[in-house]
Image: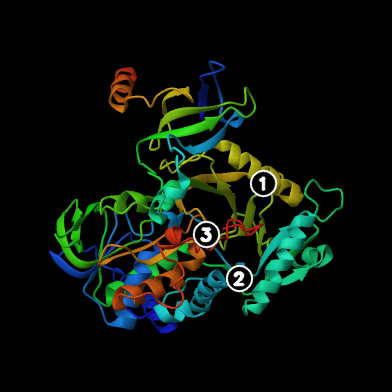
Amino acid sequence: MTHFSALSLLKNALTGQKNWQAQWPDSQPKSEYDVVIVGAGGHGLGAAHYLAKEHGITNVAVIDKGWLGGGNTGRNTTIIRSNYLYDESAKLYDHAVDLWEGLSQDLNYNVMFSRRGVLMLAHNVHDVQSFQRHIHSNRLNGVDNRWLTPQEAKEFCPPLNISPNARYPVMGGALQMRAGTARHDAVAWGYARSASQRGVDIIQNCPVTAIRRGPDGSVEGVETAKGFIRAKKVAVSAAGHTSVVMDSAGVRMPLESYPLQALVSEPIKPIFPCVVMSNTVHAYISQSDKGELVIGSGTDQYTSYSQRGGLPLIEHTVAAICEIFPIFNRMRMLRKWGGIVDVTPDRSPILGTTPVPGLYVNCGWGTGGFKATPGAAHTLAWTIAKGTPHDINAPFTLDRFRTGRLIDEAAAAAVAH
Amino acid sequence: MLLVHCPYCDETLPELEFTYGGEAHIARPENPADKTDDEWRDFLFIRTNVKGPHFERWRHAHGCGRFFNAVRDTVSDRFLTTYKADAPRPDLAVLLADASMKEPSK
């Protein structure tokens, strides 16, 4: 496998770019693996990378019904932040941000992590109070987050409309400077290349139809479109389809799957220096390196697997963007799409062991899984390798819905995901 | 945008008039004190989240204001039927047979 460097770029430039190798082979399944991971998104591929790199477990297959990174990894708005209210969440998401910072070096792959800052706008008194509570809570947890006045917010993000007569007046904002964006496809590709280089098989276009359990209840392997694959450990990292896969193992999940939509504008010159989120009016915006404005919306109100979503949400989001950033009101939108997100009742993920021996799960990220990709993958790999929860993912059990120890980010006001 | 048929108003109207009410036919426990933690979990949090025909509640919020039930395919988002809140759960096999007869010929 080619090591990417300035030298390798130069060498290939001189030889007409004809000697690049494929970054990973399109593997066919073997009959048995130590670990099978269902779902080749960033989370699943990342878990394979950390299993191989940190735990020496390389007899691993990552299986996907489509192509790798073709689900929510390729459909999100790439926002990375860790300013969550509760201690458990702050630890988990901040662990991810720590890993994001070194990810390009770790993978020898440019994931274009850009710490451009995420600004969350407060539009009413309730927002102001709840964001300031978040800021205090974050600072106690060592997570950077600070308060900006409307003028400071305007200096940080010049396109912002802070007029007191605005439809959504800006009363201030919470700014996390360590937060930002990354190139979503590169995350999947970088993890895939690294895992594959270490011996992991990536099997695409091969739906897992069921998880098979033995007479003692433990996992025996997975049924797939390409036949049965034996494995003593199976990890499900299937986002919106987690309920469907887990059902086949006889585990019912506290999940509901909703369409979440995003859209991009025509590309323009650099104008938007940061990420701005407005939870109250449900609009998230940043500018990609290609120049498109990347805009995120809220979930549709009804559960669905359709990967489409309805136009009213897009209208609502774009209307809010035009009010907050009047400079954009003549922009044309190029594309919109939907992804299916798995939402838990407390809006926190489920990450770790299950009642079934040998079955692990990483799901319930709802509308905010991308930011957690390295952290979730890293701790999931630990849990798969050792069979026990990692300190950081230990609170995010499936069992919390029985014991009542919820991590209630849903009720923590003004949380967007 | 979905078009939703309200069985009380007997009109098919845009989704914006309605709010979604989650999965249907989840009965409240008759004797809450007798329920175990497992049963409470199932009642409060576990949902079928089915990929296919889904029994669900809707409310005609900007119309008659009443709750009703619906069966909608979560893959196509197409409604198979809507029915009044006190009506029994319809037979899925019959609904699917009806739907396939109405399917435009290919």
Q: CA distance from mark 2 to mark 1?
A: 26 Å
Q: Residue at x 77, y 61 (%)?
A: A128
Query: Is the same chain shared between marks 2 and 1?
Result: yes
Q: Residue at x 37, y 44 (%)?
A: B48
Query: Is the same chain shared between marks 1 and 3?
Result: yes
Q: Residues within 10 Å of mark 2 (few under 14, many from 20)?
A: many
For the question of whether residue A255 can be seen, the reply is no
What is the chain letter for disc 1? A
Find numbered disc 3 in the image and state the secondary structure of the residue it sits on. Answer: loop
Q: Which residue is nearer to you in this view: B16 or A318? A: B16
* Residue mark closest to the camera, 1 vs 3: 3
Residue kind at label 2, given as amino acid type: Ala
Q: CA distance from mark 1 to mark 3?
A: 26 Å
- Residue B44, horizontal then vertical, whole percent: 47, 48
What is the chain letter for disc 3? A
Q: Residue at x 52, y 26 (%)?
A: B3
Q: Earlier in the sequence, mark 2 or mark 3?
A: 2
Q: Where A365 falls versus A144 (above or below)?
A: above
Q: Which residue is nearer to you in this view: B82 or A106? A: B82
Q: Earlier in the sequence, mark 1 or mark 3?
A: 1
The residue that disc 2 covers is A179
The residue that disc 1 covers is A331
Q: Residue at x 14, y 65 (%)?
A: A30
Q: Residues within 10 Å of mark 3 (few under 14, many from 20)?
A: many
* Residue mark closest to the camera, 2 vs 1: 2
The residue that disc 3 covers is A368
